[in-house]
């Protein structure tokens, strides 16, 4: 199947190449997602439901220092539907913040862990579900991007935030003290870098969640499938309180990753061509940021590797007179990574890897591909520092430099959170917003 | 064996790391080259022997348009000593320049081709000697870096150069018209990129050299082991006529490659650590440019991988609290390339590949090493554009920002050119200058 959002012939494409982005999709997800767009919720009628800062501040201050009982979606068993339970949420300790969740969402990584495929991932991920599941009930607050979050109370030492502030929790943090945080280039904080094994808070090595006193574990430091959660202050980006929480919540994960992979890492120049491998939310964010960059809707051609009997990098090189200027890999497939690198032009081409690979993958290429002046880079969360940079990304949306609505294909109430998993599993949604108070 | 130019303990090294360069040598070539420094020639007494522009212009104009008979070193058979012969050098055709060579030199790549190991190199190199050698006598003007060149006459269409100009011929060219030449990033000219197979001039597909009418072939477009040679104007960098030709001649190849690999590609910041794999001339130029950058003589530690029973990248990571900031690979060994990449720090580390690999090599690493925000790049001739940039490198030497004398360990007269091969083969020289009129 081959389809273009802007249908083009190859000659038209070649003409366009110097003036617009070339977005090459190896997955047809966008197409199916758009054609099967769910109509349960009329997004045009969605309203901003977050309380004003003043009212929320008043409402929340009464609970400071106390255990809060609230609803949370608990993953009792890998791959089985989450169960809405009443949980106890302890007050925040030093450098922690307790926040009220208004809107959250989920992404492929959440589904991946929920399915307990984590053991295929190197380093951090392998034993999470097995360890926790064997000894305890476990709560996988599967969170990658979320917002509609309002600070309820803050722990000792927290000076940046106060009750009522609007924040975006991010699955990776920024302590502002380590070498990575002090580097202009890195966002891989030594203290708060994503850790999918931990499940507990840094301050005391314990969880803030329980059900009738029995500990329930955090997931990637945020755990937002709960009406209230406790997060390290370094994982909270304080944002413009006027930003609509049901839209900007998706900036906590894949959308910012794709945006940053383009703007911070690939850095295409005006008029250059960009190949995007994989059109999930991250790939679409890459495309979107290219388009913004080129001031034009930029998808000119889809290439499906299955339609060709030679490596897709060769197909792309033929289409583009030697290769694209930039390529961004958003699938995690090792073959797509290699193709993304080998399809960039010699002399100046830059390939950026975004997708998370499997444990046993090996990136393999002939070194002459490098010596011919190609660059290969990888990125984590689009190289954005959560606290320093994400507020600025929210401002991009507020200034209409960034369109988020097109990523939000579905909205469900918290009670129907398992529908969001279904949509993701079956490739029906790009992003599904989960509304906590609906 | 482990030795440091500036001896340090590990703790001293760790202290120095933030203030100076860490230069890690995997080859001990510098050490042996320095200790076995040839004393045939007292370099301190070497004099500038190039004629002044005015006298050379007068002398040369009389030969314009005529065949010149002169001496050249001919490689009749792979691996066998060159033979000084009398050759005929035809006048330059369109976009060509005939030049008089005063000083030349050779590098490992010359020796590599002379030994006919070329068949191991991918793409360009495999059949040069076999094809030419089977059907013809062949002349391997083994040239990688050379100067002391003065324009004798110019062909049709050459407007940039006139008789008497001082030039550096470079093994790769710059047409100034193609996409690569017009790109700010690339120096891989479509027209004049290194081609070790060609052996003839572009204008008519024929050679300008002959012995008694029998064609003798060019090598990499320069062929400077001859008193006169013909070069495409795009391969000639016009330089400051005051620059001493017996010094700046080495800027046509490895020294500029190492310098550019650092300054144009790796771009270390002040105080960052740099690991250099391989201390031949290129690696030493990298070290030298780091040192200039850091305003300090920077070699703090040598690591010999044979001294350790674990991968050298792990040894380096331990020495440097997680990895170096930059690594430059100058050996061409695939294992050194992989080590150079894997020894850079996550978050900001940049590895640059310079050494030429073998045909069947595969660069292989786990993609997480990239996703953790490491960058892998390659460079060709240090990303310098020969005509645009090399005159500026000569100015660096003239302004004492660059020390070339320390690379020149030997000087021999043209009649003893085979000595230069011996020095290189036995690891005794860094650069040996061949003086044509001595």
Image (cartoon, coloured by chain):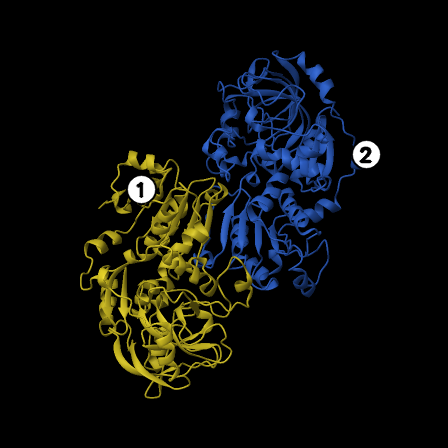
Chain colours: A blue, B yellow
Q: Residue at x 59, y 46 (%)?
A: A262
Provide residue A296's location: percent of width, then percent of height. Answer: 71, 52
Specify the farthest residue to the bottom.
B213
Q: Which mark is residue A45?
A: 2
Residue A421 appears in view: no
Q: Nearer the viewer, residue B167 or A429?
A: B167
- Is residue A112 toward the left or the right of residue A427 in the image? left
Provide residue A124's location: percent of width, then percent of height. Answer: 48, 33
* Residue A233 sits in quarter: top right
Q: Residue at x 31, y 73 (%)?
A: B225
Provide residue A232's location: percent of width, then percent of height. Answer: 55, 24
Instruction: Look at the numbered disc 2 and give the secondary structure of its residue.
Output: helix
- Is residue A272 toward the left or the right of residue A195 in the image? right
Q: Chain under label 2?
A: A
Mark 1: few, some, or many residues within 10 Å (few <14, many ≥20)?
Answer: few
Specify the farthest residue to the right.
A45
- Is residue A395 toward the left or the right of residue A321 in the image? right
Q: Nearer the viewer, residue B376 or B38?
A: B38
What whole-number distance in Å separates the C-alpha atoms at marks 1 and 2? 62 Å
Provide residue B263's location: percent of width, then percent of height. Answer: 43, 52
- Please say if A210 is above or below B384: above
For label 1, the residue is: B310
Q: Chain under label 1?
A: B
Instruction: Look at the numbered disc 1 and give the secondary structure of its residue.
Output: loop
- Is residue B410 toward the left or the right of residue B388 in the image? left
Same subunit, tags 1 and 2: no
Tag 1–tag 2 contact (CB < 8 Å): no
């Amino acid at each position: 199947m081959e389809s273009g959002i802007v249908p083009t012939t190859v000659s038209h494409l070649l003409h366009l190449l110097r003036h617009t982005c070339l977005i090459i999709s190896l997955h047809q997800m966008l197409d199916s997602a758009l054609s099967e767009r769910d109509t349960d919720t009329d997004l045009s009628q969605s309203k901003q439901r977050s309380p004003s800062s003043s009212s929320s501040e008043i409402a929340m201050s009464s609970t400071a220092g106390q255990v809060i009982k609230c609803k949370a979606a608990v993953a009792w068993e890998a791959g089985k539907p989450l169960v809405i339970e009443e949980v106890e949420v302890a007050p925040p300790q030093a450098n922690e913040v307790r926040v009220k969740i208004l809107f959250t969402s989920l992404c492929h990584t959440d589904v991946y862990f929920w399915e307990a495929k984590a053991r295929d991932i190197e380093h951090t991920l392998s034993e999470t579900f097995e360890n926790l599941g064997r000894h305890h009930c476990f709560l996988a607050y599967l969170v990658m991007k979320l917002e509609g979050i309002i600070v309820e109370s803050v722990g000792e030492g927290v000076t940046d935030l106060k009750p009522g502030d609007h924040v975006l929790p991010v699955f990776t943090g920024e302590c502002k003290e380590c070498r990575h945080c002090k580097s202009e280039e890195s966002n891989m904080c030594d203290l708060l870098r994503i850790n999918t094994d931990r499940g507990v808070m840094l301050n005391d090595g314990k969880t803030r969640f329980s059900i009738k006193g029995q500990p329930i574990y955090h997931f990637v430091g945020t755990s937002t499938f709960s009406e209230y959660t406790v997060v390290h202050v370094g994982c909270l980006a304080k944002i413009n309180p006027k930003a609509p929480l049901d839209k900007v919540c998706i900036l906590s994960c894949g959308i910012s990753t794709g945006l940053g992979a383009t703007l911070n890492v690939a850095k295409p120049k005006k008029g250059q061509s960009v190949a995007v491998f994989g059109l999930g939310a991250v790939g679409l964010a890459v495309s979107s940021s290219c388009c913004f960059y080129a001031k034009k809707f930029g998808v000119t051609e889809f290439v499906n590797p299955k339609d060709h009997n030679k490596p897709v990098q060769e197909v792309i090189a033929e289409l583009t007179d030697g290769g694209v200027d930039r390529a961004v890999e958003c699938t995690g497939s090792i073959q797509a990574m290699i193709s993304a690198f080998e399809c960039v032009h010699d002399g100046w081409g830059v390939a950026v890897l975004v997708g998370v690979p499997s444990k046993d993958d090996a990136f393999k290429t002939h070194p002459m591909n490098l010596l011919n002046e190609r660059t290969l880079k990888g990125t984590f969360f689009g190289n954005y520092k959560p606290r320093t940079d994400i507020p600025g990304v929210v401002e991009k949306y507020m200034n209409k430099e960034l369109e988020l609505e097109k990523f939000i294909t579905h909205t469900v109430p918290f009670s129907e959170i398992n529908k969001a998993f279904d949509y993701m599993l079956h490739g029906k949604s790009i992003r599904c917003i989960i509304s906590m108070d609906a």
